[in-house]
Amino acid sequence: MADLHVESTVQDNTDHSPQNNEDVQKCHVVVPTTGMKFESEDEIYSFYNNYAYQMGFGVRISSKRKKPHKTYYALGCHKRGVYESKAESSKQSKSCKTDCPAKISVIVDYDGTCAISCVSLEHNHALSPKKSRFQRSHKKIDSYSKRRLELNDSAGIPLAKIFHSLVVEAEGYENLAFGERDCRNYIAKARQLRLGKGDAEALRDYFVRMQKRSTNFFYVIDMDDEGRLKNVFWADARSRAAYQLFGDVVFFDSTYLTNKYNMPFAPFVGVNHHGQFMLFGCGLVSREDTETYVWLLKSWLECMDGHAPKAIITYQCRAIQGAVAHVFPDSLHRLCLWHIMKKVPEKLGKLNQYKAIKKTLKSLVYESIQSQEFEDGWSQMIKEYALDKNDWLCSLFDDRKRWVPLYVKVIFWAGMSTTQRSEGMNAFFDDYVNSKTSLRQFVEQYDNALKSKKEKETKADFDSLNASYKLMTGFHFEKQFQASYTNAMFKLVQIELQCMLFCNHSLLKTHGTISTFNVTDILRGKRGELKRKVVYTVSFDEVGRDIQCSCHLFEFRGIICRHMMKILIEKDVKEIPSCYILSRWRKDLKHRHYHVINCYEDLKSGGHAKQFEQLCSSFYEVAHIANSQEKYDYLLKCIALAKEKLSDDSSWSVNTNTNTISQDAHIVSEPKKPLLPPAQVRSKGHPPTKRKESKIEQVTKKKRKINVHEANGISSVNDNIYRRSYDFDLNH
């Protein structure tokens, strides 16, 4: 017999302790007895459930029946009843039922009061008070933990980490009345309450709410004949305002993340005056064909009031190329070099001389200075390795003026390097979404990502206005750039100044006021080793102070190159003309999008929620003040008194003044046609490379692969995951 001390409010000489109970500790238990009365059903359930927790079993309601003026039911052990297996089911399932007789019979009177009419305390199974927290009836997430879960989930923190923080705060799993699965269930329900039940409906409702808050919020939804979501595009007010200044060059890419419906995520991306990526709107498309991309580009053009970008960068895709030519006929179109070079192993990897071909190809692409040099070298490569029947290389040569650095560097691309990797803005979403993200979750995390991006831009503005990199030289034009440019752009100027040390110049010729120089650039590797020498031509006009270089770095990036600096110093130019200081990179301009207050969807934006936040904040402050035993005891008494007062609803009057009802309450809107979720989309397999995944997915797959190797006795592979950094440098 277990060692159990029972203290009852009613005289009870019977020993009701269960036989062979494990983990039952000495405790003071109020035992239910016949005749006990309670004010409500909630009160009697709370009493019996508390008793069950101390004894070590769960509670369930059974055999409820109603009669005139009275209701009868039983509160019993969770093991009451007999398990009935389904003969036709081949799937085995677990059951906890042992037909346990332990229960109390309850009679509910017409006024809501309850009484115990019969008590049975004997169990036919062992009890375990230490494990009571695992019983369903004892699992309960308190309001503080609910608040923590919702706030951290809306911030994009993985639930496993949120739960672990609660465990650490509670000093152990045994001190929590809920488990990780309970947290997941609660978060799932909370998301439904925030965003509705249906993915597509939630997306549309979100757009409607955002447009009510800001008339400049833009969205377009494309549906099929069955009413299913087909394509969608949207852009917030701040993105539309930023496009007016930074929308000269746009990067469009749909090869990154998809959602659970396999709808590619297609963002429109630009760069601001700090070189940071900016979002100019994004879409979710159901197909990767010309018709779909035409719809998306037209929607975006309408959003931007018909102002097409001067230049646009996309990956190599015939469908996108056709759509860009149709919608943006006057825009310069460039193909992303990173995407093209990424395909080299797949397209050429099976050739016998692959390594030699790859080396030759990279040398031609990155090191060619003149167009004739590139074309002659390409023809020689095709002939030497017998590649004349390779369709992919033939198509690349036909499109060479759209992707080879030699041809595209004469055009301004706002700092997007020819080696620009496509996941610039996609990495921006890495910590927020992945390929399993539902549309409901996406609209939550989309706002979080934009808030984060805005905060980073604000911080960069503050840093540029309040501090700057120290001058490296005494040249006046360096001071000009320090005073005008943001820190990120001024740092690029200083990099060119450093590289100027490896440049030598010589006068080639003089014609009137124009002098032409040869500048030899000694290019070095990452370790400082000599790679090669390249000669560039720089022309300088003494009268107009006009200077040009054959490397075209200024035309491409808007930063004067090291070769131009060398000649400016040679000519003793104190102050360079203002045309070489682009307003696009200045830090002292007040940009229009700074004044746009974005009405991001606040997940806890109600008045009650704000009051709740203020109360919680006040409670934290008071808890820190109560730093002695006397203050602690006083605070607990005040809380208990306030809790008792607030729990008595009869003492609080209800305002029934109908004049306080908003007019919106009288408006009855027409029932809108339900928007069905999108059908699962099968990608046509373009582009040939695998669709990129988020950083979280890459790490997860890497760990899973390592575990498999270790389980098979194979040495673990190198699990370093390299993140390619954003590269402003032009390969000369």
Image: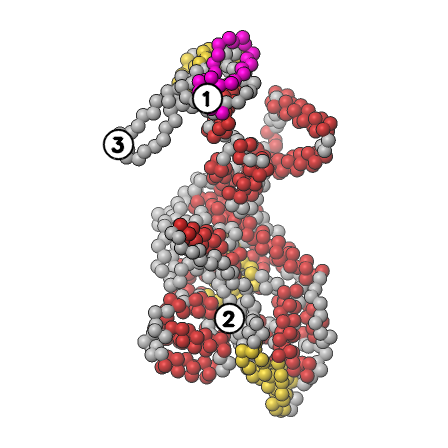
Give the mark nearer the N terminus: 1 vs 3. 1
- Mark 1 lies on residue: 21
From the viewer's side, name the closer residue of 373 and 219: 373
Residue range (magenta): 1-23
Above or below 337: residue 266: above
Q: Nearer the viewer, mark 3 or mark 2?
A: 3
Give the mark nearer the N terminus: 3 vs 2. 3
Q: Position of 191 compared to 84: left or right? A: right
**Residue 534 in sight in this render:** yes
Instruction: Give the main secondary structure, helix, strand or loop, of the magenta stretch.
Output: loop
From the viewer's side, name the closer residue of 23 and 679: 23
Q: Position of residue 302 (x, y in %)?
A: 49, 59
Give the mark nearer the N terminus: 1 vs 2. 1
Dot 1 alpha-carbon crowd within 10 angstroms: few under 14, some 14 to 19, many 20 or more: some
Identify residue type, mark 3.
Glu
Secondary structure beneath dot 1 equals: loop
- As drawn, the label of residue 418 is 2
- Mark 3 lies on residue: 88
Identify residue type, mark 1.
Asn
- Give the Cα separation between the discs numbered 1 and 2: 73 Å
Q: Nearer the viewer, mark 1 or mark 3?
A: 1
Identify residue type, mark 2.
Thr
